[in-house]
Image (cartoon, grey):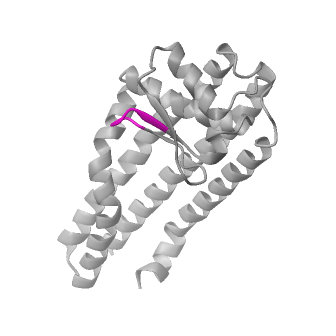
Amino acid sequence: MFFIDPLWLIIAAPGLILAMIASYITKSTFHKYAEYSASSGMTGAQAARRLLDQRGMSDVRIEPVQGFLSDHYDPRSRTLRLSPNVYSSNSLSAIGVACHEAGHAIQHAENFAPLALRSALVPITSFSTNAAYFIFIAGMFAESAGLMHLGIILFSFVVLFSLVTLPVEWDASARAKRLMVSAGIVSSREQEHASKVLNAAFLTYVAALLTALLQLLYFILRARR
């Protein structure tokens, strides 16, 4: 069985453990600084609106979306969607996340190259994420090197997507850390706390890349065997 393959347990499983640890750190850090309110009294939605308006981006909409930390920017509709714990909260956690997502909208407006590349990779990555597993497993059962190699090629796009995501997320956080102070949303001291939330969130993207790399290594070694 694929999921109890000893080779998978040795090589790929540690990546999943790292991803779970990173997710726990992100959630616990968010909850910790959700107890601290910004002295400006601004909510996450208001903070994001200020950053966007200062750059003449009044056409970018800000909408609430369900789900915990489901916050994201949709470049297709130019819409910034914030989760309930971010949209209407004036906590430092909420402001950090909201300004980070506003950073993505600013990247889009400035044609930030890594963001454009990541957006271009979305269709094939969405397909490859699930298809690679099915094709590779089918190749294992059929003892078809061709199918296994196809699965490896498809999963390589998942790794590439995770790799390109790192500079995109790092830059969005760097913009947020800088702009939330210059825009008068938080003080320098408050920015230190909000930044810890963004730093913790970045760990999840690092863990995602490591997980994908280890999974790809497993595919390659399994195909060779």
**Number of callouts in the render?**
0
Q: Position of residue 162 (x, y in %)?
A: 43, 47
Residue 75 shown in magenta = yes
Q: Position of residue 81 (x, y in %)?
A: 50, 40
Q: Quick one: quadrant of the N terminus?
A: bottom left
Residue 177 falls left or right of residue 108: right
Quadrant of the rendered image containing residue 96: top right
Q: Which sits in the foreground, 143 or 53? A: 53
Residue 61 shown in magenta = no
Magenta residues? 74-80
Quadrant of the rendered image containing residue 201: top right
Q: Residue at x 22, y 64 (%)?
A: 150
Q: Position of residue 37 (x, y in %)?
A: 79, 34
Residue 126 falls left or right of residue 32: left
Q: Residue at x 39, y 60 (%)?
A: 216
Q: Position of residue 169 (x, y in %)?
A: 51, 36
Q: Residue at x 35, y 27 (%)?
A: 113
